Structures are given as C-alpha cells and as structure tokens.
Amino acid sequence: MEDLIFHLMAPSHGFDNHKAYMHYAQPADPSTIAVPCLNMFTMNDQIISRENIIMNGMYHTTNPNIITVHNRRGTHVIRWEGLSAQTCWISKVCFEFFRATDIVASMNREEAKLPK
C-alpha cells in the first residue's frame, strides 16, 4: 500500500513525498460534518486494517449526521449481491440513502422531527 501511495497517489496529487500526501489526506474532525454522511465498512477489507475499520466505524458516536454500516464480508469498494455476483448492492444502498436525505432536506424542521 505504501508503494502505491509513494509511486502513484502522492505524485499524481502534486506531493513531493508520500508522508506529505498522507498528512494532507487525513480526514477532518468528524464532529464538524454538517450534512448526512454514510460510512460503509467491510470487516474483511483487504486494504484497510480491522483496527482502522473499528476506529473509523466509531465516527457516528461523535455526530448524528454520520451513519455507519459494517458488513462482514466484501471487497474494499464493491459489495456483490447473490451467488452469481452479477450486481453490486452498494449502489442501491447509496441511492436509498441519498433519496432519504433529499426527502428530509425538503421537509421543514417539524416534519423531519429534527431538534430545534
């Protein structure tokens, strides 16, 4: 993973070295997120360590705008559906999430049952 960042990611984003890129790429404070955010993690991810998944999976405890989903199995960015793995269910989940946030955004605060 470090080789990928060193040889591809850092140079393609204009950084002289991988450490500068990694420092820049750190997420902001999750408690400041003002819009709904869906975090999806796979517990057997081949890219992110299990410890990192557990740590990042706790962001929802700092902010009600963050919704966290843990899945037992899957690849880093694709969640195959069914035995034949013909479709990826992540697009369905994302569509439902964005549709729900759009509906809530169009409501007034009382209809959406949001705190005042």
Image (cartoon, rainbow, N blue to C red):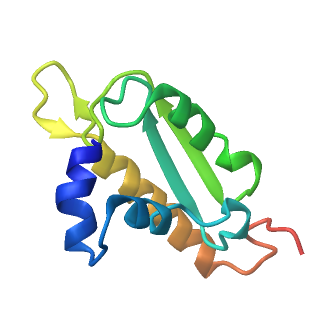
Pinpoint residue 42: horizontal percent, then vertical percent.
41, 31
In front of the other: 63 or 54: 54
Judge by depth and name the residue closer to the eye, 7 or 88.
Answer: 7
Q: Quadrant of the C terminus?
A: bottom right
Vertical placement of residue 43 versus 94, above or below: above
Q: How many marks?
A: 0
Q: Position of residue 39 (x, y in %)?
A: 50, 49
Looking at the picture, does residue 4 appear above or below residue 44? below
Residue located 39% across and 48% down the image: 93
Along the horizontal axis of the image, is 12 left or right of 64? left
Determine the image quadrant of residue 8.
Answer: bottom left
- Residue lying at 67% horizontally and 64% vertically, measured from the top left: 29
Give the residue at the far right of this rendering: 116
Residue 81: image quadrant is top left
Specify whether 41 is left or right of 67: left
Horizontal and vertical percent for residue 59?
Answer: 66, 49
Q: Say left or right for 99 vs 89.
A: right
> Does residue 10 sit above or below 69 in this rendering?
below
Q: Quadrant of residue 105?
A: bottom right
Q: Residue at x 86, y 68 (%)?
A: 115
Q: Quarter holding the N terminus? A: top left
Q: Position of residue 90 (x, y in %)?
A: 32, 45
Relative to residue 80, is residue 8 depicted above or below? below
Q: Is residue 16 left or right of residue 97?
A: left
* Pick the front one: 85 or 56: 56
Q: Which residue does the image show at 78% across and 77% down from the upper left? A: 109
